[in-house]
């Protein structure tokens, strides 16, 4: 900002200031360019969804998938959501892009149903979407337009997104829940976790964050945390799913301790929709 620039000016002298100002301009230009590219990406159809299966550990069946946003930029290549979702949030573009994600995921779920694959599709919501008027009504409209029954839609929320306005978020979650949509708390344990959220939010499941799964089963702290989250979830009548499961030993540990489901590279990486049906027909996870 201006104060810092002044300070840098005095500190560095005139030539350096000019250099610094040029660099600031270049950065602002880059940022603007990125925002414009992200805006155009929607019109140009550069956003795509990949889907990652969720495996039920009791039945060894894939019961659902998580939709994960990808941006195939002609100039930048495949961009990770971690790099562009924060920009979508800051610019408000997450609202139209988020609606595109929801309707694409719902339409894909309907297509799978027609193929005889009744998968539940989970969509990630961002904090900004929760601040918008009538989120539940908009989602209801998207469900109706796609023809997907609400019970085949799940929404993933994080602890941090509810902090801004917990009261309003609870109201919206109750509306979504009463429509028949299932609700999951994502990345559980990494945010500003509060047991009050678990008490007051009408959620159906907890997702154990990948950071607690990575070093299972050898890391005794992670093992204790994972077991505790599983017990906590079950005592509250919630389902529990572990994310980021890459190795057999992690899955064995989670299964032995009663975890209901897993998601991760062990089962499959996130893949384009067509590969999901192939995977379901050809695999055996027993
Ligand atoms: P998330 O919702 O916690 O999604 C899980 C992330 O972990 C995904 O990263 C997934 O590709 C990755 N992952 C899955 N299994 C494994 C594994 O076994 N090992 C490792 N190392 N990673 C695994 P991705 O697709 O890069 O997405 C990152 C985050 O971006 C998501 O975290 C979610 O918070 C956000 N995101 C993705 N799509 C959307 C979207 O449509 N809307 C919003 N608001 N956020 C999204
Ligand atoms: Mg998620
Ligand atoms: Mg997650
Ligand atoms: Mg995560």
Image (cartoon, helix red, strand yellow):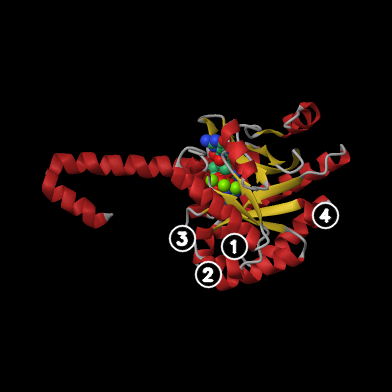
260 relative position to 141: left or right: left
Q: CA distance from mark 2 to mark 3?
A: 14 Å
The residue at the point 64 percent across, 71 percent down is 171
Would you say residue 278 is visible in this rendering? yes
22 relative position to 230: left or right: left
Closer to viewer: mark 2 or mark 3: 3
Q: Quadrant of residue 272?
A: top right
Secondary structure category for the residue under label 2: loop
Provide the residue designation for mark 4: 149
The residue at the point 35 percent across, 41 percent down is 27
Q: Residues within 10 Å of mark 1 (few under 14, many from 20)?
A: many
Secondary structure category for the residue under label 3: loop
Instruction: Note whether ligand 4 is within 8 Å of mark 3.
Output: no
Say which label, 2 or 4, has the lower sequence index: 4
Task: State the residue in front, 271 or 134.
Answer: 271
The disc at residue 192 is 3
Circles 2, 1 touching at the beta carbon (< 8 Å): yes
163 relative position to 100: left or right: left
164 relative position to 178: left or right: left
Task: State the residue in front, 131 or 122.
Answer: 122
Q: Looking at the picture, how far across and down is residue 44, in whole percent? A: 64, 38
The disc at residue 165 is 2
């Amino acid at each position: 900002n201006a104060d810092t620039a002044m300070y840098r000016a005095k500190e560095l002298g005139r030539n350096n200031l000019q250099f610094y100002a040029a660099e600031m301009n270049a950065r602002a230009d880059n940022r603007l360019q990125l925002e414009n590219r992200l805006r155009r990406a929607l019109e140009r159809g550069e956003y795509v969804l990949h889907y990652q299966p969720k495996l039920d550990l009791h039945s060894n069946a894939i019961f659902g998938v998580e939709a994960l946003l990808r941006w195939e930029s002609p100039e930048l290549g495949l961009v990770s959501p971690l790099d562009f979702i924060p920009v979508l949030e800051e610019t408000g573009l997450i609202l139209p892009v988020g609606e595109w994600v929801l309707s694409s995921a719902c339409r894909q779920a309907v297509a799978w149903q027609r193929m005889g694959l009744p998968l539940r599709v989970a969509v990630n919501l961002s904090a900004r979407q929760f601040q918008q008027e009538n989120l539940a009504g908009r989602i209801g409209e998207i469900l109706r337009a796609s023809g997907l029954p609400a019970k085949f839609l799940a929404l993933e929320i994080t602890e941090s997104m509810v902090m801004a306005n917990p009261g309003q978020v609870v109201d919206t979650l109750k509306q979504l829940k009463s429509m028949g949509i299932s609700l999951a708390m994502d990345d559980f344990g990494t945010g500003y976790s509060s047991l009050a959220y678990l008490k007051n939010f009408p959620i159906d499941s907890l997702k154990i964050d990948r950071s607690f799964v990575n070093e299972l089963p050898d890391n005794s702290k992670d093992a204790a945390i994972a077991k505790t989250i599983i017990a906590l979830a079950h005592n509250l009548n919630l389902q529990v799913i572990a994310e980021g499961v890459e190795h057999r030993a992690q899955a064995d540990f989670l299964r032995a301790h009663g975890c209901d489901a897993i998601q991760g590279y062990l089962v499959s990486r996130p893949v384009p929709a067509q590969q999901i049906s192939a995977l379901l027909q050809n695999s055996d996870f027993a």
